[in-house]
Amino acid sequence: MRHLVFVYGTLLSGEVNNYLLAGADLLGCHRTEPCFTMFNLGAYPGVVGGGTTAIVGEVYRVGAKDLDLLDRLEGYPRLYDRKLIASHLGRAWIYLYRGRISGRTLIHSGDWRSLTGGADALRAAAVRTTRDPKNPRWRDRRPRAGDNQAAKCWIHPYDDRQQEEIP
């Protein structure tokens, strides 16, 4: 069985965990309805339901084995939950963060890449090479030339004003 999955963080093309989608089909970019909130969790983002932010990402078609692999990466159902959302490409799964958000930085733009600043940015390299505690088999996979196909999905340039601390 095939599933559509909406990704918005380290699974985006050119990001550290995108290799897990090597067997998947990238269908295109998508921006959700403005009904979420995105937080910077350090090495990766977390999205929660509720709020007024549209999340920027990509939609992939994956098989059951790939969905299983993504579930393990995301710590489903304990750290993240899955919910079906509407997209212009069909109904897709989104992973919603279930952990503590108090004290986490809000990403107003809803665009993980507005924080990482693009594939060649110094900050992007630091974020992409940070160990991801969700992925015990993490490996240093820096973006290579040609990995930037997702640049078409970038909505906002890097802008510090798009973040604020949540008490």
Image (tube, grey):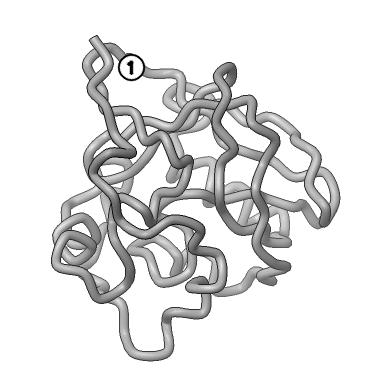
- The relative height of residue 128 versus residue 86 in the rendered view (above or below) is below
62 and 112: which one is in front?
112
Q: Residue 157's image quarter? A: bottom left
| Residue 88 coordinates in the image, percent (x, y) | 83, 53
| Residue 155 coordinates in the image, percent (x, y) | 51, 58
| Residue 77 coordinates in the image, percent (x, y) | 53, 25
Which secondary structure lies at badge 1? loop
Judged from this view, the residue extending furthest toward the bottom is 145
Mark 1, residue position: 101
**Quadrant of the frame with the N terminus:** bottom right
**Which amino acid type corresponds to the residue marked 1 in the rendered image?**
Ile
155 and 75: which one is in front?
155
Q: Residues within 10 Å of mark 1 (few under 14, many from 20)?
A: some
Q: Is residue 93 left or right of residue 150?
A: right
| Residue 89 coordinates in the image, percent (x, y) | 82, 56
Instruction: Give me the residue at 28% from left, 50% from top.
Output: 159
**Quadrant of the frame with the C terminus:** top left
Instruction: Give me the residue at 63% from left, 25% from top.
Output: 35
Q: Is residue 71 left or right of residue 160?
A: right
Q: Is residue 47 left or right of residue 67?
A: left
Instruction: Give me the residue at 42% from left, 25% from top.
Output: 79
Please give the count of numbered marks on the rendered protein.
1
- The relative height of residue 109 versus residue 48 in the rendered view (above or below) is below
Instruction: Give me the residue at 26% from left, 23% from top.
Output: 104
